[in-house]
Amino acid sequence: MAPLRVLCVHGYRQNGGSFREKTGALRKLLKKHVELVYMSAPLDVRAGTEEAPEKEDGSGPGPGGDEDPKGWWFSDVQARSFSAQQQCEESLGLDESVAAVREAVKVQGPFDGILGFSQGAAFVAMLCSLQEQKQEPEFSFRFAILVAGFRSACRKHQTFYDTPLLIPSLHVFGLEDRVIPDNMSRELLPSFQDAQVLTHPGGHFVPAASAHRQTYQDFLKRFQ
């Protein structure tokens, strides 16, 4: 049985390489079942603009975040920065990021599913919406895994949440997450009709302990 191919979408101030390092435990946990393929966002994040660096608790670089930090959109158009809590009328860079995913699907695909972390998970919800609205014919994701996801607070993005999405989804979030508190992740659940939830007692990271294996595998089994 061929492993499921999953496109991985990193968090704000990360990149494909750093996210690959931080999800090593998940790759190990699912290695017979899943091939994780990583891409980097097209937007460069300026040094010193971070609201809250998205890194695994106690690991990864210090306050500066990852080397070569990237993002999927900016909530502050002037400052070219992002905060999940920031209310804004419009954002910057989302079209470029959708185009980058389109290119990744063309070049590295096909993919069975898509996985996103933090800003990447919020972006995955938008990509699934575009797919179901038939606006992106290249997209054919059969499932989505959203880790520490949230609803964008940008007014222009609210159309992504108008109709609950049919794509099966697994929503993973930490009860001690201080970057994206679990209530923000819960607010995204009504946007998905077929939403499964995996909570863990930790913070802002992709959990991959043996206790989580069964939930991941049961979810993925539906697509194998």
Image (cartoon, grey):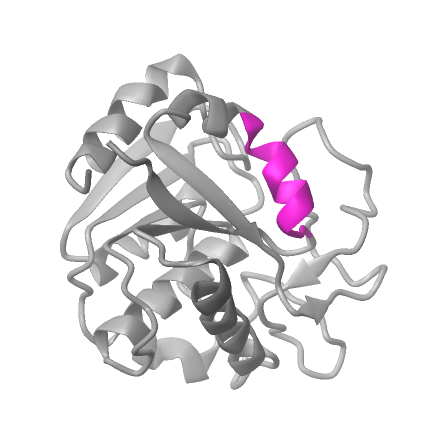
| Residue 61, picture quadrant | top right
Residue in the image at 65% along x and 69% along y: 42
Secondary structure character of the magenta stretch overall = helix
Quarter of the view holding residue 3: top left
Number of numbered markers: 0
Residue 222 as seen in the image, left or right of residue 156? left
Which residue occupies the foreground of this view, 148 or 167? 167
Picture coordinates of residue 90, whole percent (x, y): 53, 85
Q: Nearer the viewer, residue 181 or 221?
A: 221
- Let me know if residue 54 appears in the view: no
Q: Residue at x 61, y 34 (%)?
A: 22
- Asked whether 178 or 125 is in front, the reply is 125
Question: Is residue 65 positioned above or below 99 on the image?
Answer: above
Image quadrant in which the N terminus is located = top left
- What residue is drawn where x is 44% and y is 54%? 121
Q: Dividing the image into 4 quarters, which one contains the C terminus?
A: top left
> Percent position (x, y) of residue 210?
39, 14
Is 23 within the magenta? yes
Residue 182: give x, y in percent of width and height: 41, 42
Q: Is residue 85 above or below residue 30?
A: below
- Specify start and end residues of the magenta stretch as a single range: 14-24
- Pinpoint residue 218: horizontal percent, then vertical percent: 20, 28
